[in-house]
Image (spheres, helix red, strand yellow):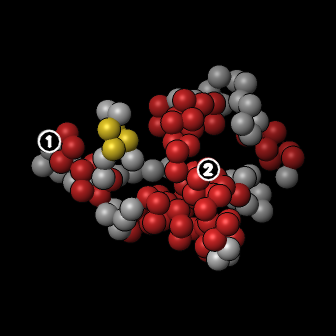
C-alpha cells in the first residue's frame, strides 16, 4: 500500500496507527457485490475483495503473497498465468487510483453520472 507516495506496510504502519504517529489505528471497508457470476462484474476485481479480507484477518501479510494466493485459488497453478497476473496487477495501483479518484470512490461509484467502468447501478442490474 502507498501513503503519502511512499510504500507503507498495512499491518505494521497503517492499522496500528504508527504511520501517522497515533497510539491506535484500525481499518474499515465497504464491499458491494452483485448477482453477477463473478460478484463484481470482472474476474480480476475480485482480487481486491479477497486481499481486503486477507488483510483484515492478518494485516501483516504481503500484498504480492496475497495476490499469488488468490491467483492460484482462482485460476490454478500454471506459473505463466501467475506471472502474467502478477505483472499486470502489482504495478496497477496508480492507474486504478488515477482512474477512480481518492480511495476508489469516483467513477466506480458513479458520482459523476457518467460511469464508464461498469455503468450505473440500474444498468448493471438490468444487464444481468
In the displayed structure, would residue 112 be above or below residue 10? above
Q: Determine the residue positioned at 86% across, 45% down.
A: 126
Question: Does residue 58 appear to the left or right of 17 in the view shown?
Answer: right
Task: Depth check: give the residue in front, 6 or 113.
Answer: 6
- What SS does tag 2 mark? helix
Q: Quadrant of residue 44?
A: bottom right
Question: Does residue 35 appear to the left or right of 91 in the view shown?
Answer: right
The mark that comes first in sequence, 2 or 1, is: 1
Q: Determine the residue positioned at 63% across, 71% down.
A: 79
**Res. 21 mark:** 1
In the displayed structure, would residue 106 be above or below residue 84? above
- What SS does tag 1 mark? loop
The residue wearing badge 2 is 88
> Is residue 53 visible from the viewing direction of this image?
no
Q: Quadrant of residue 121?
A: top right
Question: Does residue 22 appear to the left or right of 51 in the view shown?
Answer: left
Question: Does residue 117 appear to the left or right of 60 in the view shown?
Answer: right
Amino acid at each position: 500500500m502507498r501513503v503519502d507516495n511512499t510504500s507503507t506496510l498495512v499491518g505494521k504502519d497503517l492499522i496500528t496507527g504508527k504511520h501517522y504517529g497515533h497510539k491506535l489505528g484500525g481499518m474499515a471497508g465497504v464491499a458491494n457485490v452483485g448477482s453477477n457470476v463473478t460478484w463484481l462484474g470482472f474476474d480480476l476485481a475480485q482480487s481486491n475483495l479477497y486481499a481486503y479480507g486477507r488483510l483484515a484477518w492478518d494485516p501483516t501479510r504481503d500484498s504480492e503473497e496475497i495476490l499469488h494466493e488468490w491467483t492460484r485459488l482462482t485460476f490454478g497453478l500454471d506459473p505463466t498465468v501467475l506471472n502474467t497476473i502478477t505483472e499486470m496487477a502489482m504495478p496497477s495501483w496508480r492507474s486504478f487510483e488515477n482512474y477512480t479518484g481518492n480511495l476508489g470512490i469516483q467513477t466506480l461509484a458513479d458520482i459523476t453520472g457518467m460511469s464508464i467502468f461498469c455503468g450505473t447501478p440500474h444498468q448493471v442490474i438490468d444487464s444481468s
